[in-house]
Image (tube, grey):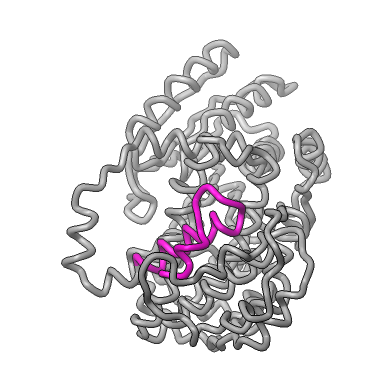
Amino acid sequence: MFQDDGSSSVTSSAIQVFPMASLSPGFGSPYPWLKELKSEERGLYLIHLLLTCANHVATGSLENANLALDQISHLASPEGDTMQRIASYFTEALADRILKTWPGIYKALHSTRISLASEEILVRKMFFEFFPFLKVAFVITNQAIVEAMEGEKMVHIIDLNAAEPTQWRALLQDLSARPEGPPHLRITGVHQQKEVLDQMAHILIEEAEKLDIPFQFNPIVSKLENLDIEKLRVKTGEALAISSVLQLHSILASDGELQKKSPLTPKILNGVHLQRVLQMNQSTLGELLEKDVVNGYSTSTDSASTSPLSSVVSAKMDGFLNALWGLSPKVIIVAEQDSNHNGLTLMERLSESLYFYAALFDCLESTLSRTSLERLKVEKMLFGEEIKNIIACEGAERKERHEKLEQWIRRLDLAGFANVPLSYYSMLQARRLLQGYSCDGYNIKEENGCVVICWQDRALFSVSAWRCKR
């Protein structure tokens, strides 16, 4: 991914000024040697600067953080190579976190900000189109529902993120082909935007009429954390299925103040270490991050597995899962981001999210051109906003609390659910979908009866199916 920009290699004198101690404010172009960096060297140095800046932010050394942000501004760009782009969004998030310490300034700068629901809907549709993650999750979800509902005459599906009608159109077609005939189907869709639910209702009702399937759509305009379970209107005699795609993690935010202290502590990179890693020859951002350049910040991909489930105490989540269990669903399918972005410390979250979003930016690098407007929108309006929430926000404001599959397995098990191993046919469908995709960097693997969708060897999203324990 990192292309040589043709500039001369960095000089030894330039390397000597890499340590943060050399940063000093100035006018015009205070760091002329930065222009001599090749793409790969620039990427490594940006990683160093981001982690050093985050360490200054975490320890309250705002003057040093400001110097780091100033130097990053000479290297990062939302229109540059992958590391330049990702650095732009992490830098914005760190600056946002600093500004939050001055509420008056922060509110004034954001007072005229406009958020268009139509733009948010559009960018999420782009994510669906450009990446295979949601498509795989939908294929697996539908197959799990079809298998669980075999022979059922009254089927009720609760979609906790009713944003994409394509999934349920495909399910309607699957159900219409059942040997015993289609069931009476009712879908309850939960979403905070009424126009999204209205559009879904129109499309699904029209599809059901074409296929001659008895169908009802029950819209619920609500955020998931505010959902009134009674409004789901589950009836006696219905076979219930619940679908949650990239939603449950947001509920962990409701009582984030109850989190226990993380055992992970940040360390600081030194100039000698940086000189050593600058000699590496890597080709992708993911590979750069895998190297020792970030080991000093506890960024091992195994760090999430060492974090106990008790590191996050969420009465809201426990209550919500218990309420779902009380509805006695035949199957519940959960898809989540497979990365630990819910650590207590800023440094832990930044290093983990660097890995995750580096892989997503790599995915886009292989799919869309650098000049693509769609690419810019997905990176800024979707990934950029998620990064900002992970890095800049705390407490109930922080919604993007992604966790690893093993943490969800333990949490669902404690809530009274038993894992339903995904069938061979589900796996076959998922693999065929990925094989038909334009890029060969995607793959899936089985893990404890669940599916993990990967970019190269990096796990990004998980899908699992569950039933109530007897």
User: Is residue 316 visible from the viewing direction of this image?
Assistant: no
Main secondary structure of the magenta stretch: helix
Residue plotted at (43% across, 37% down): 189
Q: Quadrant of residue 194?
A: top left
User: Is residue 462 visible from the viewing direction of this image?
Assistant: yes
Instruction: Pinpoint residue 33: horizontal percent, then vertical percent.
Output: 56, 70
Highlighted magenta segment, given as a residue range: 70-96
**Which quarter of the rendering shows the C terminus?**
bottom right
From the viewer's perspective, is 62 left or right of 37?
left
Instruction: Judge by depth and name the residue closer to the eye, 63 or 342.
Output: 63
From the viewer's perspective, is 421 left or right of 193?
right
Residue plotted at (34% across, 42% down): 192
Q: How many marks?
A: 0
Instruction: Pinpoint residue 190: horizontal percent, then vertical percent.
Output: 41, 41
Residue plotted at (71% across, 54% down): 6
Q: Is residue 81 magenta?
A: yes
Above/below status of 428 relative to 15: above
Instruction: Judge by depth and name the residue closer to the eye, 343 or 123.
Output: 123
Instruction: Pinpoint residue 469: horizontal percent, then vertical percent.
Output: 62, 61
Above/below status of 30 relative to 185: below
Instruction: Judge by depth and name the residue closer to the eye, 83 or 245.
Output: 83
Instruction: Pinpoint residue 367: horizontal percent, then vertical percent.
Output: 67, 39
Residue plotted at (79% across, 55% down): 445
Q: Is residue 303 magenta?
A: no
Instruction: Judge by depth and name the residue closer to the eye, 16 or 57.
Output: 16
Above/below status of 349 relative to 236: below
From the viewer's perspective, is 2 left or right of 358?
right
